[in-house]
Amino acid sequence: MNAKATIRAAAVQFHAGTDIEKNLTTTLRMLDEAAEVNPDLVVLPEFCNHLSWYDGPEHCAEVSVTLEGPFLRAVADKAREKGFFVVVNCTVLRDNGDVTGSSLLYSPEGKLLADNTKQIYIGHENDFLKAADTPAPIVDTAVGRLGMYACMDGVINEPPRTLSLRGAQVLCNSVNSFASDEGSLHIPVRAPESRVFIVAANKVGPLVPEVLLGAVSAATGIPEKHLYGSGESQIVAPDGTVLACASRDQEEVVWADIEPAAADNKQRPDGTDVFASRRPALYEAIAQDPAGQHYAPWLGAESLASSLISVPAAPALSAALASAQRAAEEVSAAVSRGAVLVGLSPLLGAELIASDVPAAAAAAEKIVAQLATATADAYVATALPLARAQGGYQYCAVLIGSGGIVAAQPQVHRSERFAWSELAAGFEPVDLPFARLGLVTSDDSIYPETFRLLALAGVDTAVVPVEPLEAWELRTGLLERSAENRINLLAPAMPGVDESSPLGVSFATALQREFTVMTQWKERPFEGLLSEPEIYPMAAGDSHLDVTLYPACAENKEVSRNTDLVRNRPWALCGPIAAVSAEKQAPAKSTVAS
């Protein structure tokens, strides 16, 4: 189809309560308001017809809409009247009696173009709504190739990832969330990780019946203010730039002019094509039935004394030993303060290594020896080029102890700036007395599949020595990987790479002991976050940060009742990620370490 080069996309946020007629009036009124900015595409929040709160299955069916009923007919008529595409999400009563949470795309002619049911529900939604059992549609329209998903489908990577891999340019996300990390983390990261546009519309106002706010707050320990929609509807560009963002608590229409075809360019600044460099054959576990997958026995200690160290990289290979000496002094000091695991920023930059790989690998040997003298009984993880015994070189995330290299994880995905590196066949976790550790090179960390595989292997703590190319890697990318997989993270980054990052440069994330929402917590108050861990940024100008991690907490991945962030992924619809057909997605005998 001949698509417009530039379109105007709008995201609309508002409140929907328990009165269906009132909700329809609000929906139509907000579509009128959206029309004032002359949009080509309008995305509405999730559950426009009724709060996601039901007395029972009969009540859920009673307040749901039908495809030919007055609610959706009115929305379709409004789309035709105003002449734009509309994505509306409702609970839909199907002919067989099932109720689904579904996003519906209407054309400017008022025609239903696509009907997409949610793939993963959260908490009590699982009690009433049927999940999708077929792939989400992608519609080639005059405003680009559109895909749809809703709320929890975007808190994990797989639903938007599969849409992007199948060619979608603009992803329309209807949201019904009280969680502040929805807008700050999960929504924006989906754009740059797959190089697509995101148009996301969230709710404001109470997400439970107003008469029950006090009772629900008392029963769950969630302050009333966190039972309200968190807003921040937004439009995000393929590089992660937030083009428009609404308030946290007001009805609002936000919009931006975008070029959908820009999403066909999957190149990073160094020229790496992030789709062509994927390794689908390594991702098969993601598309296999969790019933046949079993975690290895959890190793994680209750707490782990750790430290981040960020020192300037060597400006030349001749200065490598001087940089190593400074780093070793910092490591020794961290160990003396009690650190058992230290994450160290890369000491040799990609450009410097590429200028003379053999010489860089020789310098790396001396760096390892220097760092080993500082570890005592602790471990330090960093990234270095290593020579292979069989010839050639690999860029590796390495773990160093007093005897030298304990483990090395070579880069798995090809990148242009490390094009000289021989690729590894996969990721190999490292079992330590206090943690199952994942070592990840900087350019492997941008792929959501990387951390998914680590989670499936029972990794509780990851170290990523970072030399980022783009701001999103530090602002949302690594943080979101930690959140959606429940993995502690040390991200020591080269200083000076992204001074504008709200996290600073290097940072750590520590998993909370109390995690599952809608359950009583004793150690900490609920602060409005769904899955975001505790974040510890290194202050600008500092060279180290001591932090306590909690490896044992990685075992609990249940974000809400009946919603496990890893095991409840929509595995049967993940074929495009692993390039496997539905017939091959039979229950796996064993796909993770045991």
Image: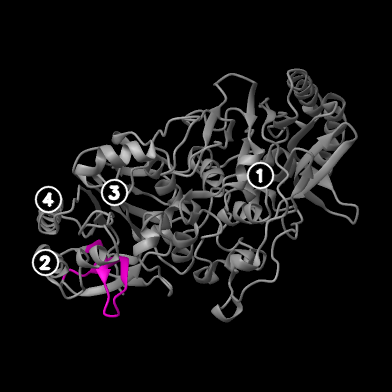
Question: What residue sits 28% from the left and 54% below the top?
Answer: 53
The residue at which mark 4 appears reads as 33
The residue positioned 77% from the left and 18% from the top of the image is 336
Viewer-side label of 1, 4? 1
Q: Nearer the viewer, mark 3 or mark 1?
A: 1
Would residue 310 appear left or right of 73 to someone viewing this image? Answer: right
Amino acid found under the numbered disc labelled 3: Asn
Question: Which one is nearer the viewer's eye here, 316 or 491?
Answer: 491
The amino acid type of the residue labelled 2 equals Ala
- In three-dimensional space, the C-alpha distance between marks 1 and 2, rounded to whole angstroms, equals 50 Å
Q: Is residue 207 visible?
A: yes
Q: Which residue is mark 1?
A: 460
Which one is in front, 231 or 235?
231
Q: Secondary structure at mark 2?
A: helix
- Whichever of callouts 3 and 4 sits on the residue coming sooner in the sequence is 4
Spot occupied by residue 318 in the image (x, y as percentages of width and height): 81, 28
Mark before the other along the chain sequence, 1 or 2: 2
**Mark 2 highlights which residue?**
74
- SS class of the residue under badge 3? loop
In terms of sequence position, does the residue under pointer 3 or pointer 1 come before the other? 3
Dot 4 amino acid type: Glu
Secondary structure beneath disc 4?
Answer: helix
